[in-house]
Amino acid sequence: MNQLIRPNVTLTHHLGLYDRALHPEHFTMRNRRVIRHGAYDIELWVMRGEHAVRFGHRDACLTEAVGRDGTRLPESGMVTSFACNGEHDFDRSFNSTGLSYMTTVQSEQLSENLFEATLAEMRDYAEDAEAAVEAWGDESGENLTVVDFQRFSKEVHVQCYHLIASGGHVLRSQTIFEHG
């Protein structure tokens, strides 16, 4: 049996939070969903190892974008950005618009066996949850991006998972967008 060899590479994702919508020209979108729920709407963009989520309420919106090394996130309208290494929490209320944002990001490198088990588990989860998914292969193996969400009356919870075979890299983010 051939054993998959993965280079010991640490990928760096970056998260950008924006107080505006982003234009799709910055991304190579593979899957897109637009959902209206009560007084707000959300738009999910799924890319290979990346995602963007726009949350809109009335005339205001916030957009979370996560890009990999080599993806240049736009600077205009950026509220904050940070590298998604290790664990990171961020929250911010926008009093002028009544919107708030909270996120927790966790990045880790898994052994080959644990990565393969996590990949299989995430495939099952995505299918059961009817999540937005992009799966692809490259020289390092199978990769997967999953974006799932739960709607509530004044908020939406978004879970994003990026499993990158190169180095067994896994990035998880849990975000809450809320309107007042």
Image (cartoon, grey):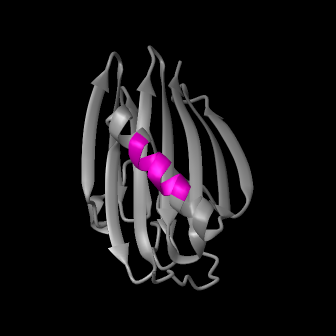
- Residue 86 in the magenta stretch? The answer is no
Q: Position of residue 41 (x, y in %)?
A: 33, 29
> In the shown orientation, is residue 49 left or right of residue 12?
left
User: What number of labels is visible?
Assistant: 0
Q: Position of residue 4 (x, y in %)?
A: 50, 80
Question: Is any part of residue 78 visible from this angle?
Answer: no
User: What residue do we see at 47% from left, 17% from top?
Assistant: 154
Q: Nearer the viewer, residue 128 or 84?
A: 128
Q: Position of residue 108 (x, y in %)?
A: 67, 62
Compared to residue 127, the image places residue 7 above or below, namely: below
User: What residue do we see at 26% from left, 37% from top?
Assistant: 34
Q: Which residues are magenta?
A: 117-124
Q: Position of residue 53 (x, y in %)?
A: 41, 45
Residue extending furthest toward the front: 1
Q: Nearer the viewer, residue 118 or 9?
A: 118
User: What residue do we see at 55% from left, 82% from top?
Assistant: 6
Compared to residue 139, the image places residue 39 above or below, namely: above
State the image quarter where residue 153 is shown.
top left
**Could you tell me which quadrant the N terminus lies in?**
bottom left
User: What residue do we see at 61% from left, 60% from top?
Assistant: 114
Helix, strand or loop for the magenta stretch, by majority = helix
